[in-house]
Amino acid sequence: MHARAAVLGSPVSHSLSPLLHRTAYECSGLSEWTYDAYEVRRDGLADFVLGLGPQWRGLSLTMPLKEEALLVAADSTALALQVGAANTLLRRADGRWRADNTDVEGVRAALAAAGVGRVRPARRATVLGSGATARSVLAALARLQVREVTFVVRDVPRESTLAQARDHGLDVRIVVGTEAIAAWADADVVVSTTPARASDGLARAVGAAVESGAIDRDAPHGQVLLDVVYDGWPTVLAQVLAARGTVVVGGIEMLVHQAADQFTLMTGKPAPLEQMQTVGRAAVSG
């Protein structure tokens, strides 16, 4: 039987999910599966999902649908509820939908592959932003035994995100704007959850802090940056931290790992991770 899946969001034209999932289908011999992309706004998600026929098996969700998906689903996994966001909808046997979150595993796997917790214990983390993606990051950091998190925000952080951090047992600190660079720049792990170019001001502030001597020219040994951006890579933040010696991980690594997890949940088959990484990395390096 023909099986269908897709990524939904707005905007969605830049998404690499079709490339990753189609590659996985081809490598796994799933010729009966197709994967597409649809422009869907928040207020249109419920009607879109309601109109899907029985051949639909799964949906990937990007912004701004990750919180709305919890309202559309008949039930949600404990992880999706804890994070307050779902990037995956899975068709249940009764035809209704279950919300899940593979972003957490995407972040955890990308950071672990970069050496977080392997070179030395990762205890301190910095998270730029406090939205839905930041909540997935917190769950991943907790799984990596991080104990302290500093949020760097432009204004007031989301209270729901702060509450989740405390639920994970994390000590929380907050830095607003480009001040107090020394309070967060030397964390064991830095994760930027902000859109492309939104972190440019912080990146320039880090560079200025290096030049003034406010922070060391060299990053702490083993420091890792994960920047969730993959369109327009590398970001200014990635370039500035790489110049300090930080191990820099692009958003494509998180995207591939979360897509691989989605593929397995939707199809029941192990994901061809290496092939998905190859096409994903090639797509952002061209």
Image: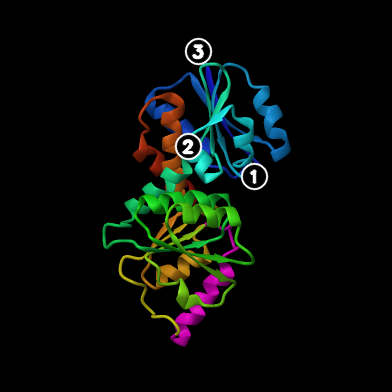
Q: In this view, which residue lies farthest toward the right?
A: 43
Considering only vertical position in the picture, is 138 above or below 173? Answer: above
**Front label number (2 vs 3):** 2
**Front label number (3 vs 1):** 1
- Amino acid at circle 3: Met
Name the residue beneath numbered marker 2: 78
Residue 155 position by quadrant: bottom right
Q: Judge by depth and name the residue closer to the eye, 119 or 211.
A: 119
Contact flag, marks 3 and 1 (Cβ < 8 Å): no
First in sequence: mark 2 vs mark 1: 1
The secondary structure that most of the magenta stretch takes on is helix
Evaluate whether residue 112 shows in this view: yes
Residue 195 position by quadrant: bottom right
**Secondary structure type for disc 3:** loop
Name the residue beneath numbered marker 3: 1
Residue 10 position by quadrant: top right
Residue depicted at x 39% and y 22%: 29
Q: Judge by depth and name the residue closer to the eye, 97 or 168.
A: 168
Q: CA distance from mark 2 to mark 1?
A: 21 Å
Considering only vertical position in the picture, is 36 above or below 224? Answer: above
Q: CA distance from mark 3 to mark 1?
A: 31 Å
Name the residue beneath numbered marker 1: 64
Span shown in magenta: 193-213
- Amino acid at circle 2: Ala
First in sequence: mark 2 vs mark 3: 3
